Amino acid sequence: MPTSTPTPVSSPWWRTAVIYQVYPRSFADASGDGVGDLPGITSRLKHLADLGVDAVWLSPFYRSPQNDAGYDVSDYCDVDPLFGTLDDADALIARAHELGLRIIVDVVPNHSSSEHPWFQEALAAGPGSPERDRYIFREGRGADGSEPPNNWLSMFGGPAWTRITEADGRPGPWYLHLFDATQPDFDWTNPWVADRFDEVLRFWFDRGADGFRIDVAHGLAKAPSLPDFEVDPRRTGGEWAPDDHPYWGRAEVHPIWRRWRAIADSYDGDRALVAEAWVTPLSKLARWVRRDELHQAFNFGYLMTAWDAVELRAVIDESLAAFEGVGAPSTWVLSNHDTIRHPFRLSVAEQLPHGIGIGPKSADRPDESAALARGRAATLVMLALPGSAYLYQGEELGLPEAIDIPDEARQDPTWWRTPDGVYGRDGCRVPLPWEADAPAFGFSLTGKSWLPQPASWTKYAASAQAGVAGSTLEMYRSALRLRREHGLGQARITWNESIEDVLDFTVNDVRVIVNMSDTEVPLPRTEVLLASASPTGTLAHDTTVWLRA
Ligand code: GLC
């Protein structure tokens, strides 16, 4: 059954692009302080060109006190000295373009840092001032206002409200922060806020950015009365997005995206906007990518799907139907800087529903090589699918989630905001191993690393895998080359009949078979284009193969 329409050859790049996420503090450190930086990224862009990706998305590198690893921005139009300078950003964009890579930068419009001058001015200007109206300040409940205005919880644990003290020393109102207390939420009903973000978009588009990844693109609009909302404590921030949710996935966000689309369209070169929107079902998420809104949205429904043949086929069909219904490409993603690296995530039973890190003091740790085999099989499913795929740095090396980080080295605010110590996201943010024998595995010349790298990562280093047949790095390179050569990104997918726990589909002239059963399954006798583990006449458990159809 055909479930997607071929894209015309002239279609814009982002419809089929493979986009690689760089997490700047963990990619490559040129300054030697143990934190990755922009010159480090520039020096390693060739690795990404050789890998065969189309574009690079950079997580935030803007000025920030770094309370949420840069997602707490104190100046949207400058580079944090930790990462370099604006000149370094220009050099990075120029080098990427030279190599034929597009650059997508992150924009964080739901909240700023509490150190942003806009928030500092709001505090200083006092009650009733226009400056206060940039953010969401409300009086507390109870006789003396000492209770938060409502019961909303922060995504990182604890209340979503913090009370301020006015300049004269009296306790003041509370401000809303759906994330950390140092990340106050903007009031997007105030046109002043929208005008400032127009300027931010233009600033980076003018510098050559090819697009934006929009942080928390489901959260900017809040129900005006800020009603209480009964949350499931395991979900901290609440259900993803029933239509009447007071802050996730509300209809009032759509005019913002239409305004941003018009700005993107006013530039040349197919600039693209991608939503980070944790919205379910996918048919609802598709509203974010209607023709006059954003270009793409991360498919977290796909990311959160367990390693199960029935569920995987269902989410692929659901995705293709939902996005096609609004004329957008589907996207596919297995890993990012907020979720457990996919070889591990697909191999553990327990994870937080919103993906933020591994559960409290998890004892649930999979066998590393079995997890890698499954992760590689999952990658070869994803990279065969029509649309656009997102890779997260280090997945091309097969990195596992780093679980054994000493408590005192942990950095994610989730770690100290949750009473039972949820490990949070540090395990997927450990700096990359580039060279097997170098200090800090070549991440920094001085051997420093802001999170410790496990000693066992020698075998994952890029230098240990480059040119080695069958390595994860070579598997990714081959997959991206074949994906392009066989036009898989703009193909139509047809399901073939298969036995239980096996997926079998054809995309253009490539047949993909995925064995998720416990036993070996027979393989048709035809040319093997690529396999996640060498087939020996049969296909082993947790293996995906690409055959010439
Ligand atoms: C997004 C980011 C995450 C960040 C949060 C708050 O979910 O991906 O890393 O902590 O927004 O900005």
Image (cartoon, rainbow, N blue to C red):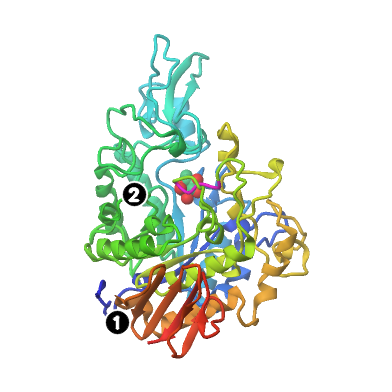
- Which of discs 1 and 2 lies nearer the camera? The answer is 2
Quadrant in the rendering for residue 24: bottom right
Label 2 near ligand 1 (CB < 8 Å): no
Decide: is 113 above or below 380.
Answer: above
Is residue 178 visible in the rendered image? The answer is: yes
Looking at the rendered structure, the number of numbered marks drawn on it comes to 2
Compare residues 244 and 352 and report the one nearer the observer: 352
Q: Residue at x 47, y 28 (%)?
A: 159
Q: Is residue 436 left or right of residue 139?
A: right
Disc 2: which residue: 279
Disc 2 marks a residue whose amino acid type is: Val
| Mark 2 secondary-structure assignment | loop
Compare residues 91 and 499 and report the one nearer the observer: 499
Rendering coords of residue 379 (x, y %): 48, 69
Quadrant in the rendering for residue 14: bottom left
Residue 9: assigned label? 1
Q: Is residue 36 left or right of residue 250?
A: right
Compare residues 98 and 217 and report the one nearer the observer: 217
Check if residue 356 falls in the magenta segment.
yes
Decide: is 172 above or below 73.
Answer: above
Q: Residue at x 35, y 51 (%)?
A: 198
Rendering coords of residue 102 (x, y %): 45, 70
**Rounded to the nearest whole Å, what is the CA distance between mark 1 and mark 2?**
31 Å
Q: Residue at x 54, y 47 (%)?
A: 357
Quadrant in the rendering for residue 67: top right
Q: Earlier in the sequence, mark 1 or mark 2?
A: 1
- Quadrant containing the C terminus is bottom left
Residue 128: assigned label? none
